[in-house]
Amino acid sequence: MTTVLTPASPLTAADRCDRCGAQAYLRVVLASGGELLFCAHHGRKFEPELKKIAVEIQDESNRLGTTAATANEDER
């Protein structure tokens, strides 16, 4: 996946995968202006197709390897 370092808002626990409803870790911005959200599993599964249609891909799947001691204020 291509990580985008633009000042996009971070994904939170409220953001859900459009495919299965799990927590989203990828935001795919489309040329049409829409966006899709995916869990890490579906982001990897659809990666080749997403790269063809994405203007930006915000990948926060690296957060899966870390555990926060407490939830962020906006996730409570």
Image: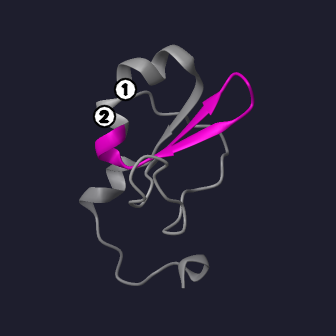
| Left or right: residue 42 compared with residue 13 | left
Residue at 42% of width from left, 61% of height from top? 23
Residue 24, quarter of the rendered image: bottom left
Q: Which range is magenta?
A: 27-42
Q: Label 1 near label 2: C-beta < 8 Å? A: yes
2 above or below 70? above
Residue hosting label 2: 44
Image vertical order of residue 4 relative to residue 70, above or below: above
Residue found at the far right of this picture: 33
Q: Amino acid at mark 1?
A: Glu
What residue is pinned by disc 1?
47
Q: Give the structural element (helix, strand or loop) at label 2.
A: helix
Residue at 24 percent across and 58 percent down: it is 65
Q: Position of residue 13 (x, y in %)?
A: 48, 68
- Name the residue type under label 2: Arg
Q: Secondary structure at mark 1?
A: helix
Residue 34: % across, % down: 70, 35
